[in-house]
Amino acid sequence: MLERMIDLVVGLLGLILFIVTFPVIALAILIDSRGPVIFSQRRIGLKGKEFTFYKYRSMSHDGHKPYETPKLDHEHFRTFVFITPKSRLTRVGRFLRATSLDELPNFWNVLRGDMRLVGPRPEIPELVRQYPPEYHRRHDVKPGITGLAQVNGRADLTYEEAIHYDLDYVNNHSLARDISIIAKTLPAVISRRGAR
């Protein structure tokens, strides 16, 4: 109950930040390229249940299409995201990803209860189906906006390192640890380490 209360309070603050910055970011996206401001996609959440995930669009309007059936790369864990050619990212999109501002709409997912502030990042169904059996344990907890993998390298992590951090969180998560991860998130965002 305490975890949910913190999610609601911080999620509401995050949603207010999203609403306040929305006109500026939305206008920049619309001026830079055609297509919707908000990008939505089906992702896998708690117990393998699908939900609709929201973020600011950072690619051209059809930039995600070649990656609808990605192949899992054991050297680069989140292949779907990290092999995106820079040419498919818009100018505004590159800035949004580098600063993690593209994730602001995630706070709506937190308020809806699809996600938490802290947890493994949610993935697309096509990629999850390629996970080894033991890695599906990441779905024993709700996905999060930030997590151990996000504060320890994000895109710079290998497949094995990402699995280690996600399963470590599942096995040892606690309110105190969540607070510690949240405290480390802002420095990680500012450093832009692993942001792509």
Image (cartoon, helix red, strand yellow):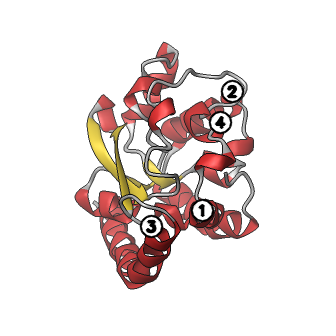
Disc 2 designates what residue? 160
Check disc 1 and give the amino acid type. Answer: Ser
Name the secondary structure under disc 4: loop
The answer to whether the residue labelled 4 contacts the one labelled 3, judged by CB atoms less than 8 Å apart, is no
Residue 143 coordinates in the image, percent (x, y): 41, 45
Disc on res. 129? none
User: In the image as oriented, which residue stretches furthest toward the bottom?
Assistant: 20
- Cα gap from disc 1 to disc 3, whole angstroms: 20 Å
- Cα gap from disc 2 to disc 3, whole angstroms: 28 Å
Disc on res. 83? 4
Quadrant assignment, res 195? bottom right
Quadrant assignment, res 126? top left
Disc on res. 104? 3
N-term mark: 4 or 3: 4
Q: Nearer the viewer, mark 1 or mark 2?
A: 2
Name the secondary structure under disc 1: helix
Image: 29 above or below 171:
below
The answer to whether the residue labelled 4 contacts the one labelled 2, judged by CB atoms less than 8 Å apart, is no
N-term mark: 4 or 2: 4
Check disc 2 and give the amino acid type. Answer: Glu
Check disc 4 and give the amino acid type. Answer: Ile
N-term mark: 2 or 3: 3
Name the secondary structure under disc 2: helix
Disc 1 designates what residue? 180
- Cα gap from disc 4 to disc 2, whole angstroms: 18 Å
N-term mark: 1 or 2: 2
Q: Nearer the viewer, mark 2 or mark 3?
A: 3
